[in-house]
């Protein structure tokens, strides 16, 4: 199997995340290490940027969580909603530790995202 050389087409730094459009058509959302809860305004800002980055099209999204950051109930509800997922074909959550696995599993089971959302231990499997 040939390994595709990836490049970043565009990159935007937001308050709680960095959003990049990769040359393979995947949007990579890297959650920053912040010392506060991820709030509804953060998720709305990310959703808006996903639309701009992908030219208002639905694209696959890879979400990298390197550190556990709590997220408000309102932010989780919006993220899981039809409106919050309007630019996303599917979410692949790349987890790096047990706390993130537990919180991501809770999000998927309790908030039931309208967009297919799965957890992965490696980027290769997530892609």
Image (spheres, rainbow, N blue to C red):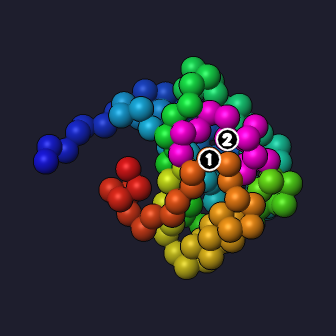
Pick whichever of labels 1 and 2 is earlier in the sequence: 2
Q: Give the class, few, some or many, for how many residues have Cα within 10 Å of label 1's Cα (few <14, many ≥20).
A: some
Near-viewer residue (101 or 115): 115
Near-viewer residue (60 or 27): 60
In the image, which residues are magenta?
78-90
Q: Give the class, few, some or many, for how many residues have Cα within 10 Å of label 2's Cα (few <14, many ≥20).
A: many
Residue 5 within the segment the image draws in magenta: no
Q: Residue furthest right?
A: 74
At a point 58% along the width and 43% down the height, the residue shown is: 18
Label 1 element class: loop
Q: Quadrant of residue 45?
A: top right
- Per the image, the residue denoted by label 1 is 115
Near-viewer residue (76 or 9): 76
Q: How far apart are labels 1 and 2 at the CA level?
A: 6 Å
At which x and y percent is residue 125? Answer: 35, 59
Q: Looking at the image, do the residues carrying marks 1 and 2 touch, with CB atoms under 8 Å apart?
A: yes
At a point 57% along the width and 51% down the height, the residue shown is: 116
Q: Residue furthest top?
A: 55
Label 2 element class: loop
At which x and y percent is residue 89? Answer: 54, 39
At a point 49% along the width and 48% down the height, the residue shown is: 62
- Callout count: 2
- Position of residue 116 relative to residue 45, above or below, is below
């Amino acid at each position: 199997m040939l390994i595709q050389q990836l490049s970043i087409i565009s990159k935007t730094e937001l308050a709680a995340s960095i959003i990049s459009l990769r040359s393979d058509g995947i949007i990579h959302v890297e959650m920053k290490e912040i010392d506060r809860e991820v709030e509804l305004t953060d998720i709305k800002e990310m959703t808006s940027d996903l639309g701009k980055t992908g030219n208002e099209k639905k694209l696959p999204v890879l979400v990298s969580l390197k550190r556990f950051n709590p997220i408000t109930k309102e932010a989780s509800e919006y993220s899981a909603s039809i409106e919050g997922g309007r630019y996303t074909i599917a979410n692949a959550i790349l987890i790096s530790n047990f706390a993130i696995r537990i919180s991501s599993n809770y999000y998927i089971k309790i908030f039931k995202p309208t967009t297919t959302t799965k957890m992965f231990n490696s980027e290769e499997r997530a892609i």
